[in-house]
């Protein structure tokens, strides 16, 4: 039986915690809501956010 690890999908946090004018972190590119809800999100939600971040910084 596989026990689910809370951090199966790692946080994109870069320890550069500054919010821009739109309340998006300049380090990880997540919204303040995404940052605060990250521990409770499903892996699917986390992967969706990571894909959006990757696409937006290309």
Image (cartoon, rainbow, N blue to C red):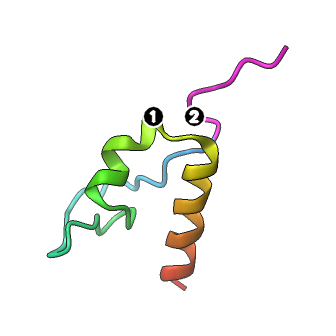
Which residue is farthest bottom?
58
Q: Residue at x 50, y 70 (%)?
A: 53
- Element marked by disc 1: helix
Find the distance from the CA under tag 1 to the CA under tag 2: 11 Å
* Location of the C terminus (image quadrant): bottom right
Q: Can you tell which quarter of the image residue 14 is in?
A: bottom left
Residue 25 among those drawn in magenta: no
Magenta stretch: helix, strand or loop mostly: loop
* Location of the N terminus (image quadrant): top right
Image spot of residue 34 (x, y percent): 37, 53
Q: Residues within 10 Å of mark 2 (few under 14, many from 20)?
A: few
Closest to the observer: 2 or 42?
42
Q: Residue at x 80, y 19 (%)?
A: 2
Contact, mark 1 vs mark 2 (Cβ under 8 Å): no
Label ID, residue 48: none
Residue at mark 1? 40
Q: Residue at x 57, y 40 (%)?
A: 42
Q: Can you tell which quarter of the image residue 19 is in?
A: bottom left
Image spot of residue 29 (x, y percent): 38, 67
Q: Is residue 44 left or right of residue 12?
A: right
Image spot of residue 25 (x, y percent): 28, 64
Label ID, residue 7: 2
Q: Residue at x 25, y 56 (%)?
A: 17
- Element marked by disc 2: loop
Q: How many marks?
A: 2
Magenta stretch bounds = 1-8
Which residue is farthest top?
1
Q: Is residue 32 left or right of residue 1?
A: left
Q: Residues within 10 Å of mark 1 (few under 14, many from 20)?
A: few
Residue 55 vertical placement versus 32 (above, below): below
Residue 6 among those drawn in magenta: yes
């Amino acid at each position: 039986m596989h026990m689910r690890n809370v951090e199966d999908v790692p946080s994109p946090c870069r320890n550069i915690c500054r919010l821009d004018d739109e309340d998006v972190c300049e380090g990880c590119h997540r919204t303040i809501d995404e940052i605060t809800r990250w521990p409770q999100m499903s892996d699917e939600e986390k992967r969706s956010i990571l894909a959006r971040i990757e696409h937006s910084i290309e």
